[in-house]
Amino acid sequence: MTFISGKYYRNSLRLKDYDYSQNGMYFVTICTYQMQCLFGRIKNGEMYLNKFGKIAYDELQKTPKIRTNVKLGDFIIMPNHIHVIIRIVGAYCNTPLRDVPTPIITQFSPMFQSPKNNLGSIVRGYKSTVTKKINETQIYEKTEHFDRRKIFQRNYYEHIVQDKFDLERIQEYIKSNPTNWENDRNNFKQSKRAG
């Protein structure tokens, strides 16, 4: 956050003039609120989803059915974060990923597409739906201490996939995430040991 004239402003993680609705592949990480392990646990290098994790998984699977400009690549639901490769298609053309190491995304465009089709909207819609469904689940299991729970951090992290080699590196990272959980910087126990 930046402090200007008595007010705080959130610093954007996005590239300033980049059109996030154009064709391309994006590696997205969405973290839970205060890095709480809400979605399950890792045991013997494998992720076991709890009921909240299953909601997060199911809603991610539904995203391409709801948004025709989205295709999902590899993804993993971890105890306190989600890694997913999102491919936006149909904005300008449907150029397939080539076998040569040229960038998938090569242009900046001043002609922005509808905000409902951009990466931010896709992530916001997903987070909103998961939060609503988890909170509905809790209402039915309501206790005297129940309050509507924040599920996700306010923002998300994104990386524009540059080429085939970048994609392969990210796919391997997603695949190996559960086996590397003990050393993961998102593992709250690990970060407490390091701090």
Image (cartoon, grey):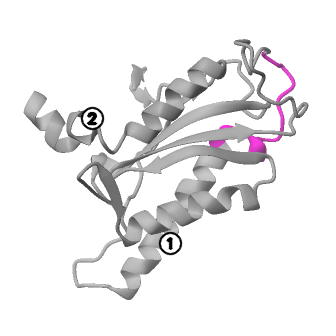
Q: Does the magenta portion include 95?
A: no
SS category of the residue bearing label 1: helix
The numbered mark, 1 or 2, whose residue comes first in the sequence reads: 1
Q: What's the magenta region?
A: 108-120
Q: Position of residue 9 (x, y in %)?
A: 46, 28
Is 152 displayed left or right of 42 in the figure?
Answer: right
The 10 Å Cα crowd at callout 1, few under 14, some 14 to 19, many 20 or more, is: some
- Residue at the outermost right position: 93
Seen from the viewer's position, the closer of residues 58 and 123 is 58
SS category of the residue bearing label 2: loop
Judge whether 109 appears above or below 125 on screen. above
Seen from the viewer's position, the closer of residues 188 and 171 is 171
Q: Position of residue 66 (x, y in %)?
A: 74, 61
Labels 1, 2: front one: 2
Judge whether 155 appears above or below 129 on screen. above
Amino acid type, callout 2: Asp
Give the residue at x 65% y 18%: 162
Amino acid type, callout 1: Lys
Quadrant occupied by the C terminus: top left
Q: Main secondary structure of the magenta part?
A: loop
* Residue at image mark 2: 184
Q: Is residue 183 visible?
A: yes
* Residue at image mark 1: 133
Seen from the viewer's position, the closer of residues 153 and 85 is 85
Give the residue at x 46% y 38%: 174
In terms of image quadrants, where is residue 65?
bottom right
